[in-house]
């Protein structure tokens, strides 16, 4: 006995609808991939061009025509920069300041975030709002008071003049609080039933679960401190203590038309942060996802 014609037509229509949905899905996926490729090209082209200029000879840079690859691959720009400036000392200064500042920032952000998330005390919400309100204050507004404080404390011209004023982050406190709030409360309740105090809970429960957050806070603080220019320029007076961004300013002042040397110096400044992000990219994305920041 033949099947019902109505059921057969309905099955063919559903198959047609499913095929149309698959085609639309493939078209949308292809469009998203194309847009992602274009966006990546736009974002990465300045970095690529920096690499091209850094490894090009001066004659190639001043020749007519646009070349997307060095005509003559050379390292003379890096050699000239290293022979003219104490790059190793400035790199060490940037690394020391960035590491110490990041370590202090991560510690203060985690402790403050845990307090705002788990310790309910009078005025906690108000203090949290006050901390967040500092994000709306431009850094340039507080530079004069910071300079007076650093000078009165006798820290002017030292590493600590750069480290201490930037060793706390309101955004880091906010990110830590949001991340800790996402931890199931049952873990805290079970620990309290077992007699654990706040310090033990923080060390044995919160810290092991905050590895993605630690990566995010550390990388953000390291990147901000590594690229900071205005405050180190004010707080440091000895050339031996300068950081790489200040050194780049000196290079531009003395070799204004040396585009190859400038890009070589800039590449030395940018490359460590790019490598660090690629290494910790997985933890960086997880930290933002679990903290609820979209």
Image (tube, rainbow, N blue to C red):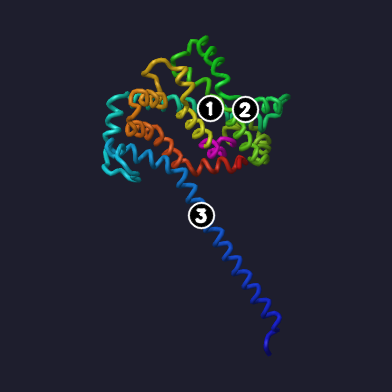
Foreground residue, 75 or 110?
Answer: 75
Q: CA distance from mark 1 to mark 3?
A: 37 Å
In primary-sequence order, the first of circles 2 and 1 is 1
Instruction: Identify residue for label 2.
Output: 136
Identify the residue at image location x=40%, y=25%: 249
Identify the residue at image location x=47%, y=40%: 280
Instruction: Identify residue for label 1.
Output: 105
**Image quadrant for the N terminus?**
bottom right
Q: Is residue 214 a member of the stretch shown in magenta? A: yes
Q: Predominant secondary structure in magenta?
A: helix
How crowded pointer 3 is (Cα within 10 Å; few <14, some 14-19, many 20+) is rated as few
- The image shows residue 288, relative to residue 10, as above or below, that is above
Q: Secondary structure at mark 3?
A: helix
Between tags 1 and 3, which lies in front? 3
Q: Secondary structure at mark 1?
A: helix
How crowded pointer 2 is (Cα within 10 Å; few <14, some 14-19, many 20+) is rated as few
Residue 148 in sight in this render: yes
**Image quadrant for the C terminus?**
top right
Identify the residue at image location x=47%, y=47%: 40
In primary-sequence order, the first of circles 2 and 3 is 3
Residue closest to the far right: 122
Instruction: Identify residue for label 3.
Output: 33
Q: Which residues are magenta?
A: 205-215
Foreground residue, 239 or 205?
Answer: 239
Residue closest to the far bottom: 1
Identify the residue at image location x=62%, y=25%: 134
Residue 115 falls left or right of residue 45: right
In primary-sequence order, the first of circles 1 and 3 is 3
Which dot marks residue 200?
Answer: none
């Amino acid at each position: 006995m033949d099947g019902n014609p109505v059921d057969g037509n309905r099955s063919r229509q559903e198959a047609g609808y499913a095929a149309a949905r698959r085609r639309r899905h493939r078209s949308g996926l292809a469009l998203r991939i194309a847009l992602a490729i274009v966006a990546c090209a736009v974002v990465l082209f300045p970095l690529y061009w920096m690499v091209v200029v850094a490894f090009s000879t001066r004659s190639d840079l001043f020749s007519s025509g646009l070349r997307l690859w060095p005509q003559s691959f050379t390292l003379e720009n890096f050699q000239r920069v290293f022979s003219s400036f104490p790059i190793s000392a400035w790199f060490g200064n940037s690394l020391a300041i960035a590491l110490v500042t990041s370590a202090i920032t991560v510690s203060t952000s985690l402790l403050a975030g845990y307090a705002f998330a788990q310790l309910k005390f009078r005025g906690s919400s108000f203090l949290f709002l006050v901390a967040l309100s500092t994000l709306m204050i431009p850094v340039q507004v507080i530079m004069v008071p910071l300079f007076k404080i650093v000078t009165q404390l006798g820290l002017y011209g030292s590493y600590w003049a750069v480290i201490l004023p930037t060793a706390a982050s309101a955004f880091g406190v906010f990110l830590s609080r949001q991340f800790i709030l996402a931890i199931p409360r049952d873990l805290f309740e079970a620990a309290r039933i077992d007699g654990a105090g706040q310090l033990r809970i923080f060390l044995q429960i919160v810290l092991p679960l905050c590895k993605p957050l630690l990566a995010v806070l550390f990388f953000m603080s390291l990147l901000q401190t590594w690229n900071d220019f205005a405050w180190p320029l004010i707080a440091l007076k000895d050339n031996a203590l300068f950081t790489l961004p200040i050194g780049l300013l000196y290079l531009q002042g003395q070799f204004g038309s040396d585009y190859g040397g400038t890009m070589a110096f800039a590449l030395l400044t940018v490359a460590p942060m790019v490598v660090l992000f690629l290494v910790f990219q997985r933890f960086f994305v997880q930290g933002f996802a679990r903290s609820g920041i979209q």
